[in-house]
Image (spheres, rainbow, N blue to C red):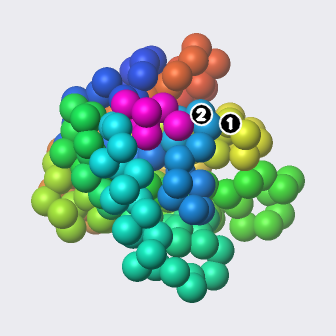
Amino acid sequence: MAAIELIKGDITRVETDAIVNAANSSLMGGGGVDGAIHRAAGPALLEECMDVAKERRGIPGGPCPAGDVVMTGAGHLPCKKVIHTVGPVWHGGSGGEADLLASCYRESLLLAEEAGLKSVAFPNISTGVYGYPKDKAAAVAAEAVRKTLEETPGIEKVVFVCFNDENLKLYRKII
């Protein structure tokens, strides 16, 4: 079974095979984690995201709807690949948000294993402007990763990268 690590830090500096980007559905960059990853990666990431968006034109919900994943190169980042996933916007919890958030983690790990990647770093998906309660998001993330690691023997390490102390404390309680 893979090692699960928890750190406080900047995901753009984490040295894993892949980092996961909490993207928006357009894949064109934005604020928060998404903006930080695009800035650190440089213009090549945006160009590749534009190509992916063109290929996926016509998909309901945009080129990458909530719960889905796509992979690109990493530009200037210290990883090999960036896995872009779109978390759900919180609407009170009765709109399938937990299933969509779990899908972000599950599909990211499945795609990483399919690509032969062995280590993946995750941010706290959907807990910023998308408003997902941090404690609920941490519980969904931990459970989804644990379950998916049972089916992805090629994944050797998962790192939860918390940007602040609040998320770090929540994850420590759960993991």
Residue 40 at x, y = what percent? 37, 31
Q: Nearer the viewer, mark 1 or mark 2?
A: 2
Q: Quadrant of residue 137?
A: top right
Q: Residue farthest to the top?
A: 165
Residue 111 at x, y = what percent? 30, 64
- Residue contact at pointers 1 and 2, CB within 8 angstroms: yes
Position of residue 34 in the picture relative to residue 3 (left or right): right
* Front-most of residues 30 and 90: 30
The segment highlighted magenta reads 35-40
State the residue position of label 2.
Answer: 32
Assess whether residue 57 is covered by the magenta stretch: no
Q: Amino acid at mark 2?
A: Gly
* Front-most of residues 63 and 6: 63
Crowding near pointer 1: few (<14 within 10 Å), some, many (20+)?
some
* Front-most of residues 42 and 172: 42
Of the numbered discs 1 and 2, the one sitting upstream in the chain is 2
What kind of element bears circle 1?
Answer: loop
State the residue position of label 1.
Answer: 128
Please give the name of the residue rendered at 26% of the width and 42% of the height, measured from the top-left corner. Answer: 75
Q: Quadrant of residue 139?
A: top right
